Structures are given as C-alpha cells and as structure tokens.
Image: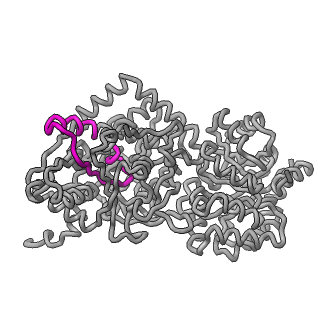
Amino acid sequence: MQPTRIQKLFEFVRQKNRSALIAYVTAGDPSPDRTPEIVASLVRGGVDLIELGVPFSDPIADGPVIQRAAARALQAGTTVPKVLDMARAIRKNSETPLLLFTYLNPVLRYGLDKLARDAQAAGIDGCLLTDVSVEEAEPYVAAMRAASLDTVFLAAPTSTDRRLKLVAQYSTGFVYLVSRTGVTGEQAALSESLAPLIDKMRVATKLPLAAGFGISTPEQAGVVAKIADGVVVGSAIVRQIEKDPGGLESLARSLAERMKK
Amino acid sequence: MITSQPDSTGHFGPYGGRFVPEVLMAPLEELEQAYRAATADPPFQAELTDLLTHYAGRPTPLYYARRLSETLGGAKIYLKREDLLHTGAHKINNCLGQALLARRMGKKRIIAETGAGQHGVATATVCALFGLECVVYMGEEDMRRQRLNVFRMRLLGATVVSVSNGSRTLKDAISEAMRDWVTNVHSTHYLLGSALGAHPYPQMVRDFHRVIGEETRAEVLKREGRLPDSLFACVGGGSNAIGMFHAFIGDENVKLIGIEAGGRSLQLGEHAARFAGGAPGVLHGAKSYLLQDADGQAALTHSVSAGLDYVLIGPEHAWLHDRGRAEYTSCSDADALAAAKKLARTEGIIPALESAHAVHEAIRRAPTEPGKLYVVNLSGRGDKDTDIYRENFPELDAAGV
C-alpha cells in the first residue's frame, strides 16, 4: 500500500531528526472562506500537519477556547460538506497532511462510507474521532481503510496496558497521546503524566507518537519535541485566530523553531 | 419470553455502547467492575435496602385514584407514589445506590448534572448523608425556572455551577459535568441521574430504579389478583420509566407506555419527543434516538418541564421501541398543565410537571377502556413547580389579594 501523506511526513521528520509540528484549527472559524488562508499562514510558519476540526454542537472533550470556536464556526454555517470544500481549496496549492478531527455524530449523519470516499477525494489523509473508543471503532475503521485514510486514536494517562495495545492496533499514521486527564486548553505547566505514557506506548507500538492537550508555549513545545515524534498545539492557535489571525504565521514560527530533537 | 439486558459491551441491540474520550474508558471499566462486585455483595445490598426503607421511605404506596377514575368513567387508575419519597422524586433510589458505590470505590468528590433539580437535590442529599463533596451542574435556564431546587441544593451544602452554553438546559449541564469528570476522574465519581450515558450507566441506573416496578407488580397482584393492563411513565432520559417497566417486560400482555415531552409543537426545536422526529445518533456516551439537524448537530429542545427537556432518549428505551415491546407517545405543555390541575382537584395530589405528562395520557385513554387496570408512575411531586404553575394559572394567583 502507498504511504499516506501523514506516514511520509513522520518518515521525513525522523530523517531530519526533529519532531512534527501539528496545529489544530476549527474549520469554519471565524467563517468557512477564511480557513484556507488561515491554514496557509500556519504552513508558511512551519506547521507540518493540520488537524481540521469539524465543529460539533456538544464538544465534551474541549475546553472553553475550542468550544467558542465551534460555536462561531456553526454560527457561520459550517457543515461537513463545507469542510470538505475547504480541504479541496487547501489542496490546490499544498501537500500538507490534513487530518479530520471531530466527534462521531456529524460523521455518522453524513454516512461513514460516504465520508471516507468524499474525504479522500477532497485530499484529506486521515481522521480522528474523539468519542469513538476502540471498542466501538470497527465499522468506522473499515470505512476509512477502504478509502486508504489513516485512523488516529487517542491514548490517555488513564489507559491500561491492555488498552494501549488496542489503541496501537487500531491506529495508523500515528498515535495521539493525551498529555493529561482533562479537556483541551492551555496549561501553565506541562503534565508529568506525559513522559511515562510515551514510555509505555513505545513498548506497545512502533508508530510515531504525537502529544497534545495543554501544550501552548514554544518552551513547552520544545520540551515535548525532545520525547515525542509530533507536538500538537490547539487552543493557543485557536485563541490567536480569535484575537488576530495576522499573528498566526509568527506564532507558528516560534513553535516550529523548537521542534529539534 | 421477552427480556431486555445489554450485551457484555453494554449494547441494547444497536443502541447504547461506550462512546467517550479514551481518558474515560478505563474509569468506566473500573466502575463496571465495582458495580458488578457490589451487586453480588450481600452487605452492600443490605445497606442499600436499609437506606431505601428507613431513609428514603420505601416501599412507596400504590394508591387507587378513585375520584379520578370515577370522574373519567373508564379504566381503574392506580398511582405509584414515588413522589412521596424523601427529596420528592424517584431520583433518590439511584443516588443512594451510586453514593454507596462511590464510597466503596474510595471517591470523595461527587459531580452530577440536573435538569429539573430533582436529581441535583437527591445527589446533594446523599452527599450530605455520606459526607462527600458535591458539585452540581445546571443550565442557566433551568436554574431560573427551578429556583427553589437551586436553593435546596445549596442549603444541603452542594455547589451549584451555572452552565451558560448552548440551550442552557440539561444537555449542556451533562456536557459540562463530563468535562469535569474527564479532568478530575481520579478523585471523582460522576453520579449520572438518568438511564443515559456510556455503559454501565444505563444498566446501573435502571437496576437501582428496578424496585419501582418490582413493588408495583407484587402490590397490584395482591390487591387486584392480576397484572395491570397498562403502565404509564414519563420519559426524559427515561429512568423512572425503565424502573417501572423492567419487572413487566416479560409480561407481554402488559402495555408499557412512555410519554415524552411534546412541548409547544412537534416542530424541531419546540419539543423533546425523540421518537417524533429524532433519528439514531450518538451523544454523551451512547447511541440512541437523538433530536438532530441534517448535519448531525444536536437540536435545541423545549419542554415546560425541565426534567424532560433533553435531546437523547435512554438507549434501552430505543431498543424497546424498535422491538415494539413498549410504545411511546408525547404530551404537550398545555395538556401536562391541565392534567396536573385535574389530579390536584380530584385527588389532592399536585404532581411534578414531568409526571403530569404520564397522568395526561392515562386521563386521555381511560374513558375508552372500562374494566382495564392502569398504573401511572407518579415519579415526583409538584412543589418545585409552584412558580411555573403560578405563571400558567394566573387566574389563581393574586386574585382577591
């Protein structure tokens, strides 16, 4: 099977001896027409992979910053088809890997098989559904595999060894490590639970490991880059979009500078 | 014989399951194990039974509503008086069970969501009883319309957190409680108040309320020498209804009738009748019938009764519905208010607005079914709804002052 853009990216950064910088944006925030430009500025600043969040009415895993972004995006009329339009627009002049990042219900409503096909055609490379546990993943994973899309699952500090193995088994592309118990959002200090989680996960899989939740400053990103293969920054990016999208490129650059091993 | 039990992974047919972020998966496994162990532990069961009897006031009476029945001139209507329990509704059954379980698991902090405030009050009550910290999430809109219960919770020592997102009702309170649980899962037990959420909650909450139907079945057999023809219960998440129905599921001649909130009309956004316009979807940990728009976003809901004002129905009800074992209908705001007034004036019982929905359906059917035996689950009392009754019956308020 052909490697996906996501798989190629992690091979590329491994050879460069650095970590991949991953940015989360809520698609359609502040409006659907702005998203391609927002993504372009992040990529110019050095972001390697974009998590394209499909807004959901009840984002139980998200803190206030991303909740507000989802509300703005929904208010602006963002839907799954519109997010696919944004992906197509981004793909016109970018090969940056795109990961759909959302909750199950909007995907279920659109149709699992149809979403997998349409997302692949729009240039999306993989998908992460925060509220789909590996136990419930079978039909979803089958649909994504049929369209050659990566499926990324979450591993958490509370996951048992048995669960970490299952998460690794169902994931392709990379595994997303939740650095602490909690919702998305900036934190003053990095969680102490991340390093032991990375150690345990390395035993369970050879897949690249990206870490997120609570990583917001260049200093924190730099620390995580030393031990993980990818660093996800979400709320800090979304907050910048809320405040002034003009500052995104320099924010991305300040994070990208810290990706060295 | 028809039975209704989830499979080993918590699915009721195609519904239920465990759709939550990975952080909560291991804690849910731990909760399931603790629950199974407690179920098989005689001292746990004995302590729960003792509390239900001497603290909560079980068994509750099965009351023959003679004047109501005679006025309607048809079916003979009994009321299962869950409204007479301590704290004023059936909710205390589940709260005592889960609080004992939390203590057994070594959790010192309890969080809960509440719509009408009845589950919040019952949670605050058991936390006071066991000396546990208590935080209750409640939608801003519900805090406004159930002010009395907010005060009761605070008097009992609980912290009530106002939730101002989305529809500012039960849905948003559950989302906020889940965010708290994700964050504080090591120290905290989420005392979910309805037969909703990820496995094992729908099964566990049901089992703690199963006593409602067991008592009803034994008592009606003793009094009437036969089983009832129809059972009536309102359905928000569906805990009082599943508690009433469950002991009768194998009795195929007993009709199980669930009543959802018909609100102002059956247009999306104006009601909370999931079987009238909802479609299978996933929210708050489980798959079931969900009121949603064409893009899979949860819809806004409306009901005059905060306790029924929720977008998803408990997954076991979805399964009973699809198999045709239970039937579901809805009752409008106006009909529920009228039923409450009728019960007040024929029997001297002011019901909770939620329970008034079930009373309405019994009143509607009774005249056409002489000789039939009904039991209505009167799940809560109406004290908490006094302000809403005052707003809706202005002719009774202020006149003659």
Considering depth in this image, is B101 or B13 the residue closer to the camera? B13
Asked if residue A202 lies left or right of residue B224, the reply is right
Residue B18 among those drawn in magenta: no
Residue B225, horizontal then vertical, whole percent:
15, 36
Tell me which colouring the rendered structure shows: one colour
In this view of the protein, can residue B314 be seen by the observer?
no
Residue at the limit of the structure toward the right, as seen here: A15
Image height of B67 relative to B96, above or below: below
Up the image or down, A199 lies above or below B328; here it is above
Can you say whether A65 is above or below A222 in the image?
below
Which one is nearer the viewer's eye here, A220 or B336?
B336
Q: Is residue B217 magenta?
A: yes
* Numbered circles on residues, count: 0
Q: Magenta residues?
A: B213-242
User: Where B311 sits versus A41, above or below?
Assistant: above
Q: Relative to residue B289, is residue B388 drawn left or right?
A: left
The quarter of the picture where residue B252 lies is top left
Q: Is residue B176 in view from this perspective?
A: yes
At a point 28% along the width and 49% down the height, the residue shown is B255
Residue occupying the point 25% across, 35% down: B55
Name the residue located 41 percent from the left edge and 40 percent from the top edge: B4
What is the residue that sits farthest to the bottom in this orientation?
Answer: A33
Residue B229, image x, y percentages = 22, 47
Where residue B395 appears, as percent x and y from the top left, is 14, 72
Most foreground residue, A169 or B372: B372
Q: Position of residue A88 (x, y in %)?
A: 76, 71
Q: Residue at x 64, y 73 (%)?
A: A30
